[in-house]
Image (spheres, rainbow, N blue to C red):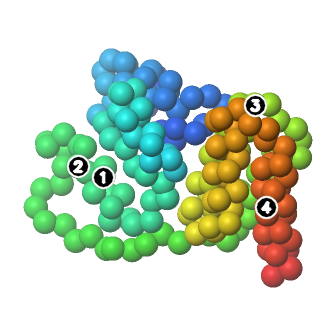
Amino acid sequence: LQVYRPSVILVDVGLPDGSGLDLIKHLSALTPRINIILGLSGDDRMEKKVLAAGADGFLAKPIESIAQFQEAILAHLPPDHRPAGLRVLKDEYVTPDPIAYNDDLTQVATLINEGYDERQVAYVAQFVTGVAKSARDEALVHAGETLALAHATRQPTHQPIAALAGLVQQRLDRQVAI
């Protein structure tokens, strides 16, 4: 950021190596301020926290419509930076890439198999839930949410992690067979 000043920054709240909320707080305090800071999360309940941290807006993941994504960014631009006149928006929908989905599931399996600390449990739950929502994989969404709830309520996480690991492995085995 010392060399390049973007007009828009998208910050995923669930970062594996730190807090997206802390990053938003830091970015919003910079002078000169970046025009638009948008927070993203697969957890709709994060919107108030994202805005309180200093973001200009919130995007719920998965983002499936290119038009909605474009409108969210344009709505937060200062009026003098917005395109003038009417513009045609293609209402295309984003479909998950099977290779990227496989890579994401491989990352989840790696995190689970390599051992993890408590902070990583929260990240794994958030990450897999977001990925599964994008892929419309309801069983995996449920497993991620179950792990997140167990972790948040300080319940044992061994069983939810084992269930999640089994589902992830099933999907990876299916991908290899295809």
Which amino acid, by three-letter code, is at mark 2?
Ala
- Looking at the image, tell me whether mark 2 or mark 4 is earlier in sequence order: 2
Q: Distance between the residues labelled 2 and 1?
A: 5 Å
Q: Earlier in the sequence, mark 1 or mark 4?
A: 1
Q: Could you classify mark 3 by the number of other residues whose Cα lies within 10 Å: few (under 14), some (14-19), or many (20 or more)?
A: few
Which residue is at 13% across, 66% downward? 86
Q: Name the residue under label 1.
A: 72
Q: Residues within 10 Å of mark 1 (few under 14, many from 20)?
A: some
- Identified by mark 3, the residue type is Glu
Could you tell whether 15 is left or right of 112 in the image? left
| Label whose residue precedes the other's in the sequence (3 or 4) | 3
Q: Is mark 2 on a helix, strand or loop?
A: helix
Label 3 element class? helix
Relative height, residue 57 to residue 106 (above, below): above
Relative to residue 176, is residue 100 depicted above or below?
above
Discs 2, 1 touching: Cβ within 8 Å: yes
Rendering coords of residue 64 (x, y %)? 45, 65
Q: In the displayed structure, would residue 60 be above or below residue 17?
A: below
Compute the Cα span from label 3 to label 4: 20 Å
Q: Which amino acid does label 4 sit on?
A: Val
